[in-house]
Image (cartoon, rainbow, N blue to C red):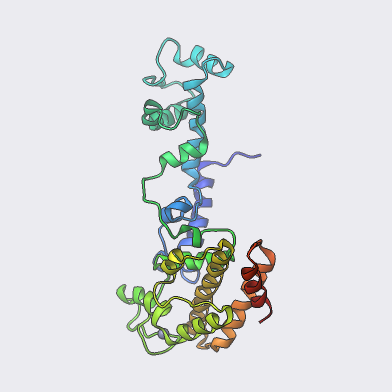
Amino acid sequence: MRRIRGNERNEIEAVCRDFLCHDKESKTSPALVAWEQICRPKKYGGLGLKKLHLWNLASIAKYVWWIESKAGHLWVKWVHAIYIKAGEWHSYKPTLNSSWSWRKLCQVKERFLPLLQSGDGLQGGYTVSQGYSWLQPAVEQVDWAPWIVNNWLVPKHGFISWLAGQHRLLTQDRLLRMKIIQTNTCYLCGQGHEEHSHLFVRCVYSSTCKNLVSDWCKEKLPEQDWCEWWIKSRYRNISKKKIMGLILAALIYHIWAARNTCRVDRFLSRPEVLLKKIKNDVRSRIKNCSFKSHSRGVVMWTDQMLVS
Ligand SMILES: [Zn+2]
């Protein structure tokens, strides 16, 4: 396998960043969400993407850890004989005529020195994931992560819901604040001002769609913040909770897609057409993913959604 050079790594990250952070129609538009946020672990509200340069540092730190802990290893004995000699690893500085790779390894050692000296969590040895996590800035865990960042949602539904959950969709109120547009009348109902809370709570069109979905799945859907509602909902059956998350994410995605179609093509589908798209997406996910439940009531509820 060919080694990826530093500038190639930066280019790969730039492509990912442009794709995920910006509105696809305009790279000059404001970032939808910070790259920092995307690269956070899922339980901290990110998408769990790896920052390649940090992963690379954490991988190199594995050699640093070997020198630290594996005195009997043949390579470590060689390192001591050639470079460190009678010196001490923590305080060791490479000479100017040392090779580039050795000086790089010593730079990584300096960066990881606080971890090596504290030994926090290293009792069982060092792993690259552990080193990568240690390099991340400390942030608080979020409780909505299990809903949005998971493998049972349709990926594009999950991504749009992830943005919506953080109010980071490029709604018109953001463009208005940046003075990119002059008015922010809702494309969907033509009545309110388009902002997150209008689009997903008060909008007449969205509410009609939500009520149709509610009638279909025979479940009451929230009047207020949908993310918060789902997290706090007390479904005893985990399959039902997952399927309700699947339905909500599909609803959010299709409302946002209808809004975008209306903005570009000046055409708005009837709520019944939106319901049909949601049904198709949810049904195909239910058929293709495992939502097995031992509850007869939940099985009947799921079966009924597949045919109604
Ligand atoms: Zn509206």
Residue 299 x/y as whole percent: 65, 69
Residue at the image position 37 percent from the left and 51 percent from the top: 140
The percent position of residue 184, horizontal first and vertical second, equals 35, 82
Counting from the top left corner in percent of width and height, residue 228 is at 41, 67
Vertical order, 148 against 189 (above or below): above
**Residue pushed farthest front?**
296
The residue shown at (45%, 86%) is 188
Give the quadrant of residue 187: bottom left
Q: Does residue 299 appear to the left or right of 100 in the view shown?
A: right
**Foreground: 154 or 78?**
154
In this orientation, does residue 57 appear?
no
Give the farthest residue toward the top: 86
Is 32 drawn above or below residue 57 in the view shown?
A: below
From this view, report whether residue 207 is shown above or below residue 292.
below
Q: Seen in the image, is 292 located left or right of residue 207?
A: right
Q: 86 or 259: nearer the eye? A: 259
The N terminus - image quarter = top right
- The C terminus: image quadrant: bottom right
Q: For ligand 1, which image quadrant applies?
A: bottom left
Q: Nearer the viewer, residue 205 or 81?
A: 205
